[in-house]
Amino acid sequence: MEQLRIPGPTPCPTDTLQAMTKQMINHRGDEFGQILSGVTEKLKQVFQTVNDVFLLTSSGTGGLEAAIVNTLSPGDKVLSVSIGVFGERFATIAKQFGAEVTPLRFEWGKAADVDAVRQALKAEPKIKAVLVTHNETSTGVTNDLALINSAVKEFDKLLLVDAISSLGSINLPVDEWHCDVVVTGSQKGWMIPPGLAMVSVSQEAWQAHSNAKMPRFYWDFAQAKSYLERPTPQTPWTPAISTVFALSVALEMMLKEGLSNITARHAQVGKAARDGVKSLGLSLFAEESHASNTVTAVAASDGLDTKKLLRILREEHQVVLAGGQQRLDGKIFRIGHLGWVTEDDIKAVISALKVVLPQAGFKG
Ligand SMILES: Cc1ncc(COP(=O)(O)O)c(C=O)c1O
């Protein structure tokens, strides 16, 4: 079987896949209502929040759009803390809907500097919200969200977090860290296929919602809340029912493993990936102090042709890794290690790399 080690979609255990083979049920009936309320309660445990959590039928990007259009109005000032491709995407969505975005960009491969965030907030008191990527999948860097959040809250701003490739794998206590809207996606650490975005919404985000004028229909959190609170809990629009079945099973598995064990497993697997690539003479692209435990970005050096590397790995070793995105194309390759993954899976990747690296021109 192919070893899919890209940072999403990730491999799914048989139990979650099997749950998806169940026959369709009425999405406005009692059976689905019970599943939806069970899933929502369990999601709250993983998000570590007592606030609202909603399931949206979309990929993660839809969740990012929902975070913006539910809390902001055209002309609102927004600070975008960006450390890579996905930070830029979050800012682009805000711009498209008419926000005035102040970009605060950091060198790709590095984490955001909290003092710079503080300075930017001091310089522009009218900023209403801050956009942050918790784990930047394009560079393999995890921001120090707790620190960034404390700066954002010193200035009493709304904090919108892209936690698509972190939540459920890397610790993110949403309430303790005062995150207002947090977005994640089913195809990442949740061990299920693409199809759902999950979002949490704080009280402050609801206050912002009541004044937010950006156009929204499908994404309206007020609709999601009113349908979820009906006597038979539902979603306003037809949900990806099969993916919800899978999520229900995945959440049981996750809570059985325990959040701290999941975080520890990802830390162990992340370390194995970093140690493994370094043992082959490769260098990490991300600064090591902030290297991600869900995706490892590796710099292409010493003659390494990443495209050739990925092709030989895939064709001859059934190991599928990811390349670099946008300006990192050809400059890095990435190993995804989130969700259903063990240290042995990563050792297998490292063994395959050892064989293929010289064939792909690596002279290190
Ligand atoms: C950090 C981050 N943000 C946003 C996205 C976009 O999510 P999707 O492709 O599910 O729309 C991804 C997906 O790779 C991601 O890793």
Image (cartoon, rainbow, N blue to C red):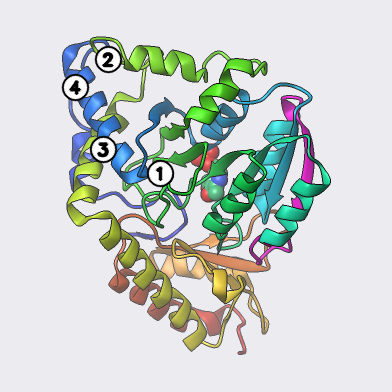
Q: Which mark is residue 34?
A: 4
How far is disc 4 from disc 3 in space, using C-alphas?
A: 12 Å
Mark 4 within 8 Å of ligand 1, using the beta carbon: no
| Distance between the alpha carbons at the discs numbered 3 and 1 | 17 Å
User: Which residue corresponds to the image point at 39% horizontal and 72% vertical from the top-left?
Assistant: 349
Determine whether label 2 and label 3 are within 8 Å by CB.
no
Nearer to us: label 3 or label 1: 3
Under circle 2, the secondary element is loop
Q: To which residue does mark 1 refer?
A: 187
What residue does disc 3 label? 42
Spatial distance from mark 2 to mark 3, Cα to Cα? Answer: 19 Å
User: What residue is rendered at 48% in x and 45% in y?
Assistant: 164
Q: Position of residue 8 (x, y in %)?
A: 45, 50
Instruction: Look at the numbered discs 4 and 3 and tell me whether their residues touch, using CB distance below 8 Å.
Output: no
The mark that comes first in sequence, 3 or 1, is 3
Residue tagged 2: 27
The C terminus, quarter of image? bottom right
- Amino acid type, label 1: Gln
Foreground disc of the pair 4, 1: 4
Question: Spatial distance from mark 2 to mark 1, Cα to Cα?
Answer: 22 Å
Q: Is mark 1 within 8 Å of ligand 1?
A: yes
View quadrant of ligand 1: top right
Q: Quadrant of residue 21?
A: top left
Q: Tell me, yes or no, whether the two marked residues, 2 and 4, touch with CB atoms within 8 Å.
A: no
Q: As shown in the figure, which amino acid type bears the numbered disc 3? A: Lys
